[in-house]
């Protein structure tokens, strides 16, 4: 456990897993633990994987510069993230989210937690990942499962980030070619990608997840993973699209290609 972070100043919960939290944030700590436990039960049923081993660190914002992290993006815009710099891995949760994420509703906060838990579960899957894939190939899975959890556990209909979606409405308006300026398959991350650009991509992914969940039930993900989690050196975007179509049904190709943001 890194010594830089002042764990000794934090309180601890030990059930159902270890949660470190500031003394003033016990209510938040218990809420996070409860959310993770309930989501974990659904994920274990869905993916046939046991709850991964991890701890939770709820961070006072004064201590945020000291959190364990491997990427600056994890800390530049405070939000929950999972790090494997600790043993076991740690779900790092700030007590305040960056303003870029809009109004912090309970559903939005839960959605962020579920996303990180989903990543942990899929990392726990013993099947190999393809070595090289387009960004969306992994990312849609995390967003799709996290949104399903939010709909199941928190009663959300459609997307979670409705307020931020309104601010980025132009990103969903198709151009002359019939597609949005940025698409799920066309986006890639570079060193100079801004937080706003990446947030646009995440909003598109969330809409994609919502449309998929409306089109077909959650069993889609298990069919997709059976095709995707096979050892390969590289998968191209068209190959991943084909896997997704096959996991939906052959008649879904036209529907999928008709999504203006895809």
Image (cartoon, helix red, strand yellow):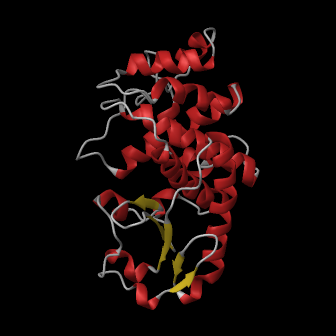
Q: Is residue 172 above or below residue 258?
A: below
From the viewer's perspective, tell me whether residue 105 is left or right of residue 140: right
At horizontal 58% and vertical 88% (from top left) the residue drawn is 24
Q: Is residue 211 above or below residue 152?
A: above
At horizontal 64% and vertical 48% (from top left) the residue drawn is 44
List x then y, in percent, for residue 27. 66, 79
Mark yes or no: residue 258 visible: no
Q: Quadrant of the N terminus?
A: bottom left
From the viewer's perspective, tell me whether residue 67 is left or right of residue 178: left
Q: Splitting the image into 4 quarters, where does residue 38 fall?
A: bottom right
Which residue sits furthest right? 155
List x then y, in percent, for residue 60. 46, 81
Q: Is residue 104 above or below residue 18?
A: above
List x then y, in percent, for residue 177. 43, 15
At horizontal 58% and vertical 82% (from top left) the residue drawn is 25
From the viewer's perspective, tell me whether residue 215 is left or right of residue 179: right
Q: How many marks?
A: 0
Q: Please name whichever residue, 202 or 233, is drawn nearer the observer in this view of the structure.
A: 233
List x then y, in percent, for residue 40. 64, 55
Mark yes or no: residue 223 visible: yes
């Amino acid at each position: 456990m890194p010594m830089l972070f002042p764990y000794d100043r934090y309180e601890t919960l030990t059930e159902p897993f270890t949660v470190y939290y500031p003394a003033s944030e016990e209510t938040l700590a218990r809420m996070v633990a409860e959310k993770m436990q309930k989501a974990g039960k659904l994920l274990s049923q869905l993916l046939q994987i046991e709850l991964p081993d991890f701890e939770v660190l709820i961070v006072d914002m004064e201590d945020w510069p000291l959190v364990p992290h491997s990427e600056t993006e994890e800390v530049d815009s405070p939000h929950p993230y999972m790090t494997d710099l600790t043993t076991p891995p740690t779900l790092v949760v700030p007590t305040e989210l960056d303003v870029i994420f809009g109004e912090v509703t309970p559903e939005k906060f839960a959605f962020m937690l579920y996303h990180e838990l989903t990543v942990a579960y899929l990392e726990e899957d013993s099947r190999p990942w393809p070595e090289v894939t387009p960004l969306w190939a992994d990312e849609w899975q995390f967003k799709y499962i996290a949104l399903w959890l939010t709909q199941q556990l928190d009663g959300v209909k459609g997307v979670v980030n409705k307020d931020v979606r309104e601010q980025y409405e132009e990103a969903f308006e198709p151009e002359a070619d019939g597609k949005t300026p940025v698409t799920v398959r066309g986006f890639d991350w570079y060193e100079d990608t801004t937080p706003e650009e990446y947030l646009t991509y995440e909003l598109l992914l969330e809409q994609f997840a919502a449309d998929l969940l409306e089109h077909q039930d959650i069993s889609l993900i298990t069919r997709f993973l059976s095709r995707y989690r096979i050892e390969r050196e590289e998968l191209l975007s068209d190959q991943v699209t084909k896997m997704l179509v096959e996991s939906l049904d052959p008649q879904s190709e036209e529907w999928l290609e008709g999504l203006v943001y895809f």
